[in-house]
Image (spheres, rainbow, N blue to C red):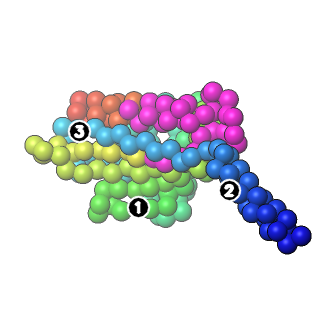
Amino acid sequence: MRRTIARTFVVAAALTVLGAAWAHGPTRQKVRESIEIDAPQAKVWAVIGNFQDMSWLAGVAKTEGEKGNEIGATRRLTLAPGITIDEELYKYEPEMMSYSYRITAVDVKVLPVTNYSSTLSVSPAPGGKAKLEWAGAFYRGFPNNDPPPELNDEAAVKAVSELYRGGLAALKKKIESGS
């Protein structure tokens, strides 16, 4: 009888471990994009350093927010009527020309991610240029197993990568052209 109970426990424990190994939930995805801008770091920071102003990002029609660049500051990006993204600042280091924020509300049809956080930072590049880096970490838009294609890991990475590349390229053009 003891052997039967002991075997039952061993089998149950093995099935639990195997079941956990077979389960597949979402994994944290990361995207990091950067661009060199032919301008001093201070000039790039002057454009991106105000958390309350994201007018430099194509597609953002309006930015509204509270608390400036204080930790806990919030902003709402309006992309088009009825399409908004709410964000919160959780780290602000002007001496390092860097800040980090998280999305607190977004429709996954707009950006197919959840638990998104991001950091923008400006650093020196050769020849007096600046390097602007945009790095983010997030989960796909569908938190359970078997996500639909538009909410899977690949869709999330693609959307964020395109957002970062497009935003950085537009910012480079804006700063270098002096507009």
Which residue is depicted at the point 47% across and 64% down?
Answer: 70
Residue at x 76%, y 58% (from the top left corner): 11
Identity of the amino acid at label 1?
Answer: Tyr
Q: Nearer the viewer, mark 1 or mark 2?
A: 2
Q: Residue at x 17, y 43 (%)?
A: 129
Image quadrant in which the C terminus is located: top left
* Residue 143 coordinates in the image, percent (x, y): 67, 43
The quadrant holding residue 34 is top left
Q: Nearer the viewer, residue 102 or 173?
A: 102
Quadrant of the frame with the N terminus: bottom right
Q: Amino acid at mark 3?
A: Glu
Query: Sequence order check: which comes first, mark 3 or mark 2?
Result: 2
Q: Earlier in the sequence, mark 1 or mark 2?
A: 2
**Residue 54, x across and y down, in percent:** 44, 42
Q: 47 or 36, which is in the foreground? A: 36
Q: Is residue 163 left or right of residue 47?
A: right
Q: Which mark is residue 17?
A: 2
Q: Amino acid at mark 2?
A: Val
Question: What kind of element bears circle 2?
Answer: helix
Q: Secondary structure at mark 1?
A: strand
Q: Which residues are magenta?
A: 136-165
Q: Which residue is mark 1?
A: 92
Q: Residue farthest to the left?
A: 127
Q: Residue at x 56, y 46 (%)?
A: 27
Q: CA distance from mark 1 to mark 2?
A: 42 Å
Q: Which mark is residue 36?
A: 3
Q: Is residue 140 magenta?
A: yes
Would you say residue 144 is visible in this rendering? yes
Secondary structure beneath label 3: strand
Left or right for 134, reference 14:
left
